[in-house]
Image (cartoon, helix red, strand yellow):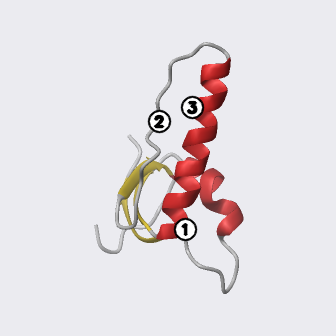
Amino acid sequence: MQGYKVQNVNDYVKVELTQLGADILNRHNARSNESMAAIGIDLVSKTDYKVGDWYKDQFWSILRLFGDYFILGAEAPFMYYEVKPAD
């Protein structure tokens, strides 16, 4: 989808993870799994992302998850992205 830009925060975005992005996502999912287990919910989110893996979610969720790491001059949590417009 070359040239397509996010038009809506509900658009789905697929990103290719860097090592930093994989680490962030794995930590986040491990904490979520622990929190859910503590209240008796059997939720198992993936915790073995690695460099080059693709992660797909809505744009607002990508910003929520990786937003603190978007700092000028810092390593990026992902390199490439694709966008699928929200229905």
Give the alpha-carbon distance from disc 2 to disc 1, as whole Å.
18 Å
Q: Residues within 10 Å of mark 2 (few under 14, many from 20)?
A: some
Q: Which quarter of the rendered picture does the N terminus lie within?
A: bottom left
* Residue at 61% over, 23% down: 36
Does the rendering let one see residue 62? no
Identify residue for label 1: 20
Rendered position, 8 above or below 15: above
Residue 49 appears left or right of 1: right
Give the alpha-carbon distance from disc 3 to disc 1, as whole Å.
20 Å
| Residues at circles 3 and 2 in contact by the CB criterion of under 8 Å | yes
Residue 69 appears left or right of 50: right
Rendered position, 2 above or below 28: below
* Residue at 66% over, 61% down: 67
Mark 1, secondary structure of its residue: helix
Which circle marks residue 45 in the picture?
Answer: 2
* Residue at 57% over, 31% down: 33
What kind of residue is marked 1?
A: Leu
Estimate the x, y position of residue 68 in percent, counting from the top left: 71, 63
| Residues at circles 2 and 1 in contact by the CB criterion of under 8 Å | no
Q: Nearer the viewer, residue 55 or 47?
A: 47
| Residues at circles 3 and 1 in contact by the CB criterion of under 8 Å | no
What kind of residue is marked 3?
A: Asn
Identify residue for label 3: 33
* Residue at 35% over, 74% down: 3
